[in-house]
Amino acid sequence: MRNFFAHKGRMALSAVAVLLSVAFVCGTLVFTDTMNTTFDKLFAATSSDVQVSAKGASDTGETQADNGKPPVMPASVLGEVRKAEGVKSAEGTVFSTSVTVVDADKDSLSPSGGAPTIVGNWNANDARTMKISSGNAPRGPDQIMVDADTADKHHLKLGDEIGVITAVGTHRAKVSGFAEFEVTNPGAAIFYLDTKTAQKALVGDTGVYTNVNVTAASGFSDAQVKKNVTAALDSGYQIQTAKEVADANAKDVGDFMGVMKYAMLGFAGIAFLVGIFLIINTFSMLVAQRTREIGLMRAVGSSRRQVNRSVLVEALLLGVFGSVLGVGAGVGLAIGLMKLMGATGMNLSTDDLTVAWTTPVVGLLLGVVVTVLAAYLPARRAGKVSPMAALRDSGAPVDAKSGVIRALLGLVLTGAGGYGLYLASQADKASEGSMWLGGGVVLSLIGFVVIGPLLASGVVRVLSAVVLRIFGPVGRMAERNALRNPRRTGATGAALMIGLALVACLSVVGSSMVASATDQLDKTVGTDFIIQSDSGQLITSQAVRAARTAEGLKGVTEYKWTEADFTTPDGKTLKKTAITAADPSYATDLNTETVAGNLKDAYRPDSMSVHEDFAKAHGIELGSKITVAFEAGGEAARLTVRAITSSEVVIDQGAMYTAIDTMAKYVPADKMPLDAMVFASAKDGQEAAAYKSLKTALDDYPQYTVRDQTDYKEALKDQIGQLLNMIYGLLALAIIVAILGVVNTLALSVVERTREIGLMRAIGLSRRQLRRMIRLESVVIALFGALLGLGLGMGWGATAQQLLALEGLKVLEIPWPTIIGVFLGSAFVGLFAALVPAFRAGRMNVLNAIATE
């Protein structure tokens, strides 16, 4: 206890590392639990006692049909439901999420965070959870009501014109009122029309509903009413109780939150791993500094077990202190994340803040156990100090034997990791290779950590020759200080190495994915322009006709996607199998590699193509017949396989093609799917004019985006870049903890070298030179960690790319600007970490420093 409180400053940075790691874990748990609580309350509040949905709707609500409209039921269902026993009231509703809503300037009013845009009729069920705060509910076709959050975000006022764009067309109305959420706003943008207008705008027919909301009469349970309603209707409807609807919605949210939760906990684990090195270094240095003190304790009767236990008790106190603060900081972090979500439109209330009893228990256990385990090796080393150490100068003797064993073990682990990576790169299947990759990454990482001291001796000398020698004697002293204790330098560098290895690996993988996709686009995409909706809306026939009017176009290709039941030559029936229907020109718009036949033949009447893996799995050859029952209805088609495409492509991987005319032969005209994408090619030499003309032609369809190949590549790069930036942000915590490790190592080494610093100052070393020496030592340690991390990470990334090559992503690209930038940035990290230790060293009193024992 006395040792712990006597060295409060030395323990502080280690406590901060524990605090940050525990805070990340607890913050993640509190945030995800609060999100689940919030959505559970929302789903419970917005679900009617019993809900009747149209055939084809998902368990959680609407499913967009191939025609771009929501699945509907005839209005007569409402009358049948009202007659069922136990029904107090029933109300027909219509809504859709396959919409784009724009203001008068055609700017989108949809949320930017990925939440849905919902347009529906104002009904009694919505009135339970929404309160009209201004204006009035819609009373005619020219009125629309907007949720207050969306109105505030886009500065909408009463009377402003809004356009609702659906598969039916564009409906324009003026804002009649605003409605506020009385429950948590899930981040969606919600717009209300009156019932008849909603039916016309969303479906194009006033005699239909998407749902019927049922209120149970007193004395009847939801389950009883569901049973009675089911008996009153045909089997073609989906009928659910409020609990079933809420559970289905909660499962969807829970699945997403589960992925998010474990991803964040994974990054918290990385921060803990880095923190372990900091704690090991701290206690190793404290034990080394107290060698004589421990020797005296042993001389006066302390046993090995007592000395060992005293160090572990210090670690226990550190773990408890850091973990308790970490739990509190975790709750604060969760509240901060909730505020951040509020900035994206999802207003989470602190009233729903959920701190389960397991959260602080997990945080405390994790923080304490990790800290005590990290201190075990230094504690064991302390127990081995003999009474004779009291007669020697301060400092732990070097165990040459343990150093040799460590070096051999490190070489074996590194070699095993390298062999695992080699086997991964030679794998024939990505699934097999991924197992070797995982093993190789873990073993090589552990190997580098164990072999760190051996590497430090060589790498630091090389770095010093390049970086430090130009600073003369001060640079040479900095080099010798870094080499004085290779074990400490290796552990400090390893902490930084872990975070930077992951950054380098992900940078290589991300850059390779972009480069591979770009290469595939250049090689296979022969079309000039791609038209699609970024929100997933299908492309209407009106928009296609508008695109065809653009000047300078050589041709326009339609591309539809649907599902069908396949009956293959081996007698198997495959339900809901994807099939793509396109114009014959798509065979030249996308130069897909074939392994048999010619893709153009797949667009002949009653013909199709399959991909190689599918053909092998079902014994399909050129000329084989497949029975295709399109989900949209109509009679089953018997199609002849005219081409077999390669499965090793990036674009349209696994696609099976047929002609739109073939599909139209078997599917009723009113059930033909809308286009998922449209491609256009310009006449030679008219690309720029055609691009401009195409954008002008689709100006009245702001739900669709026109991109040329350059735009498409940029969009792809931005998507991967956003994902990588988010991951880098999560890795930042581990790097911050690593920086604390460098600070702590330098601070403790300054204390350890107090007398030496005093002597150097006495023989003429200036304060400025002293500070420079410590800064240079810090820089070379940081660069050592960066060099190991970046080298290891690039090796991991290159191996991962070899596995991606099996999936068609065949280009390896090393992002040298990023790698070089991170390496140079590590030098600044070293400078920053040395600021406080160098300042403290410079302020030392020379005589007091010389007199220090």
Image (cartoon, rainbow, N blue to C red):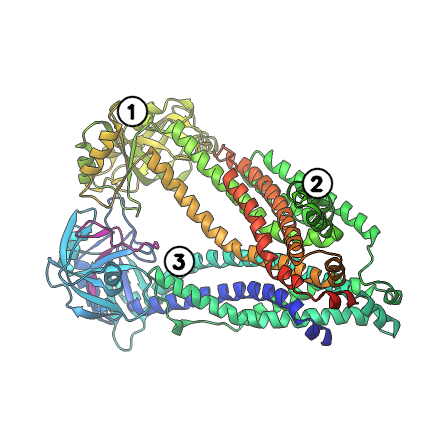
- Say which amino acid is labelled 3: Asp
Sequence-first tag of 1 and 3: 3
Circle 2 sits in a helix, a strand or a loop, which is it? helix
Label of residue 285 in the image? none
Residue 741, by quadrant, is bottom right
Sequence-first tag of 3 and 2: 3
From what the image shows, is residue 615 above or below residue 173?
Answer: above
Q: Residue at x 45, y 49 (%)?
A: 725
Q: Which residue is mark 1?
A: 604
Position of residue 283 measured from the top left corner of the image (x, y, whole percent): 71, 64
Sequence-first tag of 2 and 1: 2
Circle 3 sits in a helix, a strand or a loop, which is it? helix
Within the magenta stretch, is there residue 95?
yes
Residue 695, by quadrant, is top left
Residue 849 seen anywhere in this rendered image of the structure: yes
From what the image shows, is residue 305 above or below residue 738?
Answer: below
Relative depth, front residue between 612 and 145:
145
Residue 460, by quadrant, is top right
Q: Quadrant of the N terminus?
A: bottom right
Position of residue 512 measured from the top left corner of the image (x, y, whole percent): 49, 37
Give the spatial CA distance, label 3 vs label 2: 44 Å
Q: Which residue is mark 2?
A: 415
Label of residue 252 in the image? 3
- Say which amino acid is labelled 2: Gly
Circle 1 sits in a helix, a strand or a loop, which is it? loop
